[in-house]
Structures are given as C-alpha cells and as structure tokens.
Amino acid sequence: MNSNDQVITTSNGYRIEIAYDQFASDPRDPREFCNLGVMVCFHGRHDLINEVPSIDHRDFSGWAAMEKHIKKAHDTAIILPIYLMDHSSISLSTMPYGCPWDSGQVGFIFVSKEALRAEFGVKRLNKEIREEGETALRAEVRAYSEYVKGETYCVLVHNADGESEEYASGFYGYNHEESGAAECMRQFIKTFGAEEGMKLAA
C-alpha cells in the first residue's frame, strides 16, 4: 500500500483511514521516543537536530575533525555520516546523494559502545550486534527525514455517526507497509468489525 491515504468502511459502518498527520511528533523527542543513536546536524538555512549542545561545527576544521572528536569523546561503537538533499524539499540519508550542487554532509549519527551494549544486554560487541545497531541508526535517520519532509501519517477510526473512536500516530513515510500504518489499519479493521475476509489493497 503506497498511496498517501486509504479508506476502508466496515460492514457495520466504521470508517477507518490512513491520513496525513499535521500534528505528528518529532521522532527525536526523548519524551516520546527512545532512540539508540545520537544525532548532531548543522545547516545554514535549516534548523536541524543537534543532540549534543557542546558540539559546534564552527569549532572544527571539517567533518573529519568533528568525527575524530566524537569518536574520542563518546567512545563510539558506530558513527555514520548524515547527508542532506535540498531540492524543492529537504531529505536526509546516511548515504551520499551524488549531487554536488543540492546536497552535502550535514552531520553524524552515532552510538557509544556503552549504549549499544545496554541496548542488546551484552558485554561484548560482535559483528552481528554492530550490524543490527547500524541498521537501527539508518532507520532513525530515515524517520527523521520523513518528519522534516512532512511525510507523517496517522490511522483514524470513526463510527457510523462520524464520532472519533480510535487514533494511532507515529507513522513516518509514504510507504504505509514499511512504516507500520498498514498493519495498524488491519488491526483496527479486525477490532471494529470488518466483513470477514476483507483485505487492504497491497
């Protein structure tokens, strides 16, 4: 399911839909989300996240110098660069975009060895755990990118009288299967009485 919005009406009149969420929470908000990685980003025109206030890009000669400082100061297990593409809208990635005019590096996401050990409940970090940690950091950057782009969605449930019955938010990205919005919608369809065998379009 890749469309931005999808609506299902159940046999007993419930309307269940995936809709744009203009009040979506920032996925970097520690009051609502528990992220593994720490992000530090800097851009002259865009207000991006910097979760280590003591780090200022003006204190370093370049990204390599900042990376060296982060590795030493935070005993990192994993550190990945963050790149920004600024073309009609902005997006972020841990992989370079390949456009020298509209893109470039804006920061890093990293996790300390201590935090990664605590996340997986281990004393020793092996290759598999580091790979899982890297996958998690890349996913966090994707979620933040979708948030800054405004690709944020929720799942709404209204009864036959149009009254709100249920609401779920925190789905980032237009691909609803990947974000989890489609699965949430399927669960709501089961809960609120859809016809047996009713399925969402893929």
Image: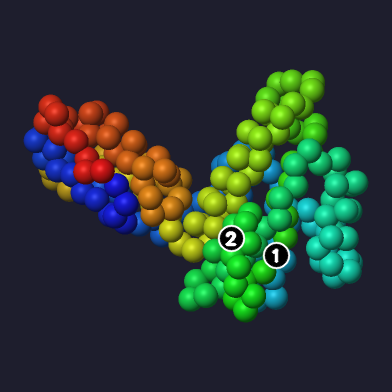
Give left or right: position of 126 versus 102: right
Q: Is residue 164 left or right of residue 49?
A: left
Q: Amino acid at mark 1?
A: Val
Identity, as a three-letter code, of the amino acid under mark 2: Leu
Q: Can residue 49 be seen from the camera position used here?
A: no
Query: In this figure, which residue is indicated by the disc labeled 1?
Result: 106
Quarter of the figure with residue 130: top right
Q: Secondary structure at mark 2?
A: strand
Q: Residue at x 51, y 57 (%)?
A: 147
Residue 37 sits in quarter: top right
Q: Is residue 122 visible?
A: yes
Q: Are marks 1 and 2 in contact (CB under 8 Å)?
A: yes
Dot 1 or dot 2: first in sequence order is: 2
Residue 174 horizontal/vertical position (percent): 38, 54
Say few, some or many: other residues with alpha carbon within 10 Å of mark 2 (under 14 / 14 to 19 / 20 or more): many
Q: Nearer the viewer, residue 58 or 134?
A: 134
Q: Residue furthest left?
A: 11
97 versus 178 height, above or below:
below
User: Circle 1: is it few (<14), some (14-19), or many (20+) Cα within 10 Å?
Assistant: many
Q: Is residue 18 left or right of residue 59?
A: left
Q: Which residue is mark 2?
A: 92
Quarter of the picture containing the C terminus is top left
Residue at the far bottom in the pictured view: 101
Residue 180, image x, y percentages: 40, 40
Residue sitting at 15 percent across and 34 percent down? 198
Q: Considering the numbered disc 1 on the image, is that residue within a helix, a strand or a loop? A: strand
Q: Nearer the viewer, residue 103 or 19?
A: 103
Quote the CA–CA distance across marks 1 and 2: 9 Å
Q: Residue at x 34, y 37 (%)?
A: 184
| Residue 20 % position (x, y) | 35, 57
